Amino acid sequence: MKIIIVTPAPPGSRAGNRNTAARWARILRGLGCRVRVMTEWDGEDCDLLVALHARKSHAALRDFRARHPSRPALLALTGTDIYRDIRQDPNAAASLDIATGLIVLQEAALAELTPPQRSKAHVIHQSVVTTLTPAPPARVFRVCVLGHLREEKDPFCAAQALRLLADPKIELAHAGKSLSAEMAREAKRRMRDDHRYRWMGELPHWAALRLLARSHVMVISSRLEGGAHVVSEAIAIGVPVIASDIPGNRGLLGAHYPAYYPTGDHARLAELLRRTIDDRRFRARLATAVKQRRRLIDPQRELRAWEKLLREVGIGPGNSVFLRNQHRKT
C-alpha cells in the first residue's frame, strides 16, 4: 500500500508537524507501506492520504477526495486547528467534513468535535524513544522552556515569572526559533535585563532533549496545544512539568496533575516554581505524576494504534512479519 503524508512544514524544518510526519512515516514503513512525505499533494497516486493541519492542508484534502472519492483521507488535527481555526476559518472547518477520518493527539481534543466528527476520530498519542534520564546541575536550579517564539506559545510567561523570584541560583534556559524580529528583540532585551534568562535560539533535536534532561523542571506555557510532543518527551525522560491549564496539556498529563497554572498568569507560575524549588516532596510528587503517564507514549502503543487504524480504513494490517517481531518484544 502507498501512503502520502502532507505537512505544511518543509524538509529540514524542526516544526512539530514535520517531526510528527517523519515519525509516522517510519511507523508506516515498518508496517509494510510505501510512504512519501510532501508539503502539498501534487496528484501522485496513493491508497491513503494523511494530511496534517486542517487549514494549511485543505487544498490537498479537497483535491484528493475530488479525484479519489472512494479512497480514505485522514486529517491530523493540530492545536491551532482544534482550539481556533475550525471555528474561525471556513476551509479548516470544511476539512473536517471532507476527511474520511480524523486523528487527534490526546483524549481531551475529542470534546472539541461534533458528534459526527467524533465518530470518525482516532486518538494516537505521540511516542518517544530515548535513553536519557534526568541529570540536572547541582549548582543552579535550571528551568527550561522548549518552544518557538510565537504568540500561541506565550513564550515569555516563564521569563516574567522569573522576575518575581529573587533567587540568583535560578536559571531559565529557553530554546526555540523566533518567528518574528519583534520576538527576537524581546528575547534579547530580557536577557539584558535579567542574566538568569538565556534564550538559545533553535537547537537540533538531540540538543533540545539533552537540555530537557539536564533541567530540574520544564515549563510549557502555551495558550493552545493539540498535544505537545515536548510534553511527551518530558514524560519519557522523567522531567517534572509545570503546565498552563489548557485541554492539550491536561490530555497528556491528566486531569489530576498537580502543577497547572491559569494560562498567562505569570504570578501563579512563579508561585509554582518557588514551590518546586523549595519543596523536595512536591518536586518528587511531580516526577512521580509524570512517570505515571509513560504508558501513553510507549512506541508499541502508537504502533498498535496505526495498525488498528489501517485496518479500519480498509487498506490492510501491514507487514505481518514485522508485527510479529514487534509484538514479541513487548
Image: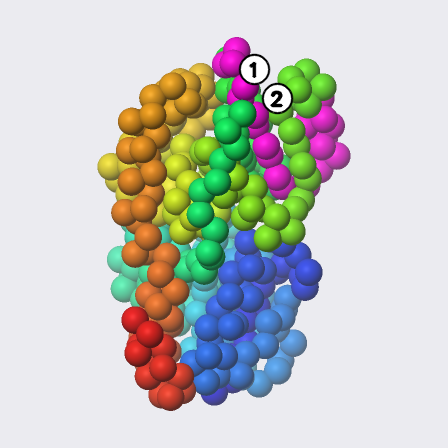
What kind of residue is marked 1? Answer: Pro
Label 1 vs 2, first from the N-terminus: 1
At x 54% / y 19%, what residue is drawn? Answer: 169
Q: 206 above or below 149?
A: below
Q: Indicate the position of residue 104 as horizontal and vertical percent values.
A: 39, 58
- For this rendering, which residue is in front, 228 or 67? 228
Q: Determine the image quadrant of residue 4.
A: bottom right
User: Which residue is under mark 1?
Assistant: 168
Q: Secondary structure at mark 2?
A: loop
The residue carrying mark 2 is: 196
Where, by quadrant of the figure, is residue 73 drawn? bottom left
Label 1 neighbour load within 10 Å: few <14, some 14-19, many 20+: few
Residue 145 makes an appearance in the image: yes
Q: Residue at x 52, y 72 (%)?
A: 25
Contact (Cβ within 8 Å) of mark 1 with mark 2: yes
Q: Position of residue 10 (x, y in %)?
A: 67, 61
